Amino acid sequence: MSNKKITIEFNDQIVRQFLIASVVWGAVGMLVGVLIAAQLNYWQLNFGTSWLTWSHLRPLHTNAVIFALVGNMMFAGIYYSLQRLVKARLASNFLSQLHFWGWQLIIVSAAASLPFGFTRGKEYAELIWPINIAVVLIWVVFSVNFFWTIKKRREPSLYVAIWFYIATIVTVAILYIVNHLSIPTSITHSYPLFGGVQDALVQWWYGHNAVAFFLTTPILGIMYYFVPKAAERPVYSYKLSVVHFWSLVFLYIWAGPHHLLNTALPSWLQTLGTTFSLMLWAPSWGGMLNGLLTLRGAWHKLRTDPVLKFFAAAVTFYGMATFEGPLLAIRSVNALAHYTDWIIGHVHVGTLGWNGFMAAGMTYWLIPKLWDKPLYSKSLANLHFWTGLVGILLYVAAMWTSGITQGLMLNATSDNGTVLAYPNFLDTLNTIRPLMLMRVIGGGLYLVGWFMMGYNFWKTVKGANQVNGTIEVFEEATLEDSSTYKSPIALIFSTPVLFSVIGSLFACVWMFGKDFLSIVGLIGLVLIVVLAFAHFESKGKKWEDWYNKLLVTSLPFTVLTVLAVIAGGLIQIIPTVVMHNAQSAEDRKQTPYTPLELQGRDIYVREGCYLCHSQMIRTLVPDVLRYGDYSRLGESIYDHPYQWGSKRNGPDLARVGGKYPNIWHLRHMEDPRATSAGSNMPTFKWLLENELNNSTLNRKIEVQRTLGVPYPNWTAEEIKKLVQTQANGIASDLNAAGGIIQSDREIIALIAYLQQLGKAKITFTQSLAPQINP
Amino acid sequence: MTPTPPNPEEDGEIREHSYDGIQEYNKRLPNWWLFTLYGTIVFWIGYWSYFEWFHIGLNGPQAVQQAMAQIEVQKLASSPEINDKNLWKMSRTPQFVLAGKATFEANCVACHLVSLRGKSENPLAIGPDLTHTKWIHGGHPTELYNTVTNGVLIKGMPTWGPVLGAKKITEAVAYILSKHTEGEPIEVVQNLPESQTK
């Protein structure tokens, strides 16, 4: 068999496209970020429009920077490194182009829908259902292109970067699909399948792991390729790569509930969230160590090379963010920090520091290679670095100070701890206004740095030749040498895997078993760990051989990755879905909304109220003193989607119903400062003008019934009458109080919804007595 | 700083395989890193046992119910004696009136306005006039105190008791009373008469 050498050309065109898209969308996403940051101090900056209002733009900002900036950057980095690491051209030009243009179309449709109130009302999962389907399809295109290329590889063994890419592809697919399961009520609206606590858990299983598997693992893969390339140094430790990869993908999934600490989420889930977040600290730092220590021997290059400067700073910020994360997952720290700017600061250490700087470093490294021309200005790139760095530091310092200040003020009490020291929420808001302004300056500087990169990019590539990398390979790939490895099945059922699975099973028996079973589980767990260590000590070489074999077979590797990531999700979500449904909700149960209230709730979701107002009074004294009795799990069990919220730019609304008269709400929506002096809430005047659209209401109620909400079998006529009666009642009450408004305006429905929050007739499903007297 | 060449003695073996020119050392895991990992695993076992196995630690609802019960006891023990005489006395004591003014302006002016004249000053205001001798829910000092503490939800008066506490409410009532004189006629009406809103 003749096997002559041939030269193949990599598909670098697709890399160029994704790289440009990443820089352009990044600028757009961050510009929106700076605008909404400024709006928190100057509410007038929505210029009286609904579509430039904070709560409409915030989803645009988050979706743009996550899916447009990091998404495009990730695809550029993956496609560039994958081809070189497996010595093969991307499998399909058509799929690559479909991937690129499909993804850009999704971004454009997001920008054309989110500002206009088309949203699912779940953070980072706001896009409406037709776009969700497009995302899934394009992700499938990406996966096929990726795995097909792997199939065609000429390099048998998979490098660590590819492990992280595989974990990304399979996990994002699982997370995205489960959290977007919905039933449509129209072409632009749907209700999520899960409700209340189930929806909260699924949302943060997704939300937390979007951070893990969209913003972390692909970027770690990119780090493992580009950092050693740029530093021209070997990776610090292969052993560390193995251990931190598997511990990271296994542990990350379990930590989602730390977003719901001190809420109505069942205690066992909160405890899992805290402990697994802490266990995640070392695996995360494993990535940081391997990145930073790869730079050993290349530190002197940092002085001159902007690429390495960006990488070194990015990895350091990754380390800071992954230390801060477990810290914030401790219940008492979380009691102070949750719902405040501290969390915003934490997120931006990761996004501006880790994601943004990795993107910048990678871009500066790739430009000269993809266009065969030195960078237009190295000193401008250095200036970008320092401007960006100062921007991040200002941003983060402002948010830490602001978050801790507001948290302390909100939690402060006087008179021997019996009353709040600052009963007016606005006192705490107006204290942090200077810090919020400092954040705008920090974010603005970072954006200026980004524009410098855009300019540098433009000046370099204008008129430059696009070049594609090439490599000499043997024509016939000599990959499928079956004698070098066992069958895929035998590879999966190997000693290390069996130890891991049995160990995990014992751990679950210990945690979830009762009495005797618990003890058996704990003893079993300890025994398995000891046995595994002993086995590794004596047969370590065999483990290493096994792993080397695993690396040359992509299928068993992918199967094991899926097993590692789904374990945590299954163990948390299945019991929650089975146990915490309406029939067995803790001590009290919500009554379904009236048709008008349901309409009002959909307006609440559409306007993005949940982005500034939580509906979750935590099991903490300051929360109870400020907002009333703590929220019970059953009180939101019929909420599709749940509206517990994640940030309090304004006060909690879980029990706002009946607290103020209807006229207060009317005046407040028309001009928040008329009732709450010093408020930074934008005006929502259009709610007083828009006519309530009831055209899909019957379908909405039908879908709610399908989802398990116990609505009676109303006829269309009955629904119409219920809406009219309730709306007329509210309108006449408003008129009597001097608020002249027609009963068919959207504001009437919103007031109906707000006035029943926490007031719904509560069905006690069991006596409260045993809980009060333990 | 001078570049340090790779030192095979110190850095140990380099893995045979290279990927697109990228090589890997096979260095052992740092001890402190391993201890961090093991430490957090041990913590997991201890923390879970404490809260979820032996239930020694209180969960959220248990802890907050216990704390709120203690606060109730504390409030009862330290509540000031509320009667008409004391409240009138406080309304003539600048310390109380000034403290009450601050509380009033932080919490009450949205509806009753800074002037306390509410609807009398501006028909669009939500709250009634508090300077007049005609009252909707009673004008005796203790009645005022109860109205503020318990609220009148149907009329839109929030329940301030749990938010402000007895001390701040007493002061706010003293501030309102400072606009009145003891012994003035008190009339209870259904709605404040139209003439008043002029």
Image (spheres, coloured by chain):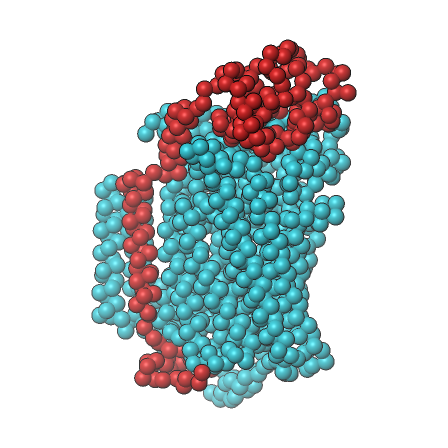
Chain colours: A cyan, B red
Q: Is residue A91 visible?
A: no
Residue occupying the point 48% across, 26% down: B166
- Relative placement, left or right, of A72 versus A532 is right
Work out whether residue A380 or residue A591 is closer to the camera in this orientation and state it.
A380
Q: Which part of the image, by quadrant, shows the C terminus of chain A?
A: top left
Up-down relation of residue A443 to residue A11 (above or below): above
Work out whether residue A210 or residue A361 is closer to the camera in this orientation and state it.
A361
Q: Tell me where residue A173 appears, x and y as whole percent.
A: 52, 57
- Relative placement, left or right, of A522 versus B15 is left
Q: In which quarter of the image is residue A383?
A: bottom right
Q: Tell me where residue A767 appears, x and y as whole percent.
A: 39, 24
Residue occupying the point 56% across, 72% down: A361
Q: Tell me where residue A257 appears, x and y as whole percent.
A: 44, 47
Up-down relation of residue A422 to residue A6 (above or below): above
Residue occupying the point 53% across, 35% down: A423
Residue occupying the point 36% across, 66% down: A243
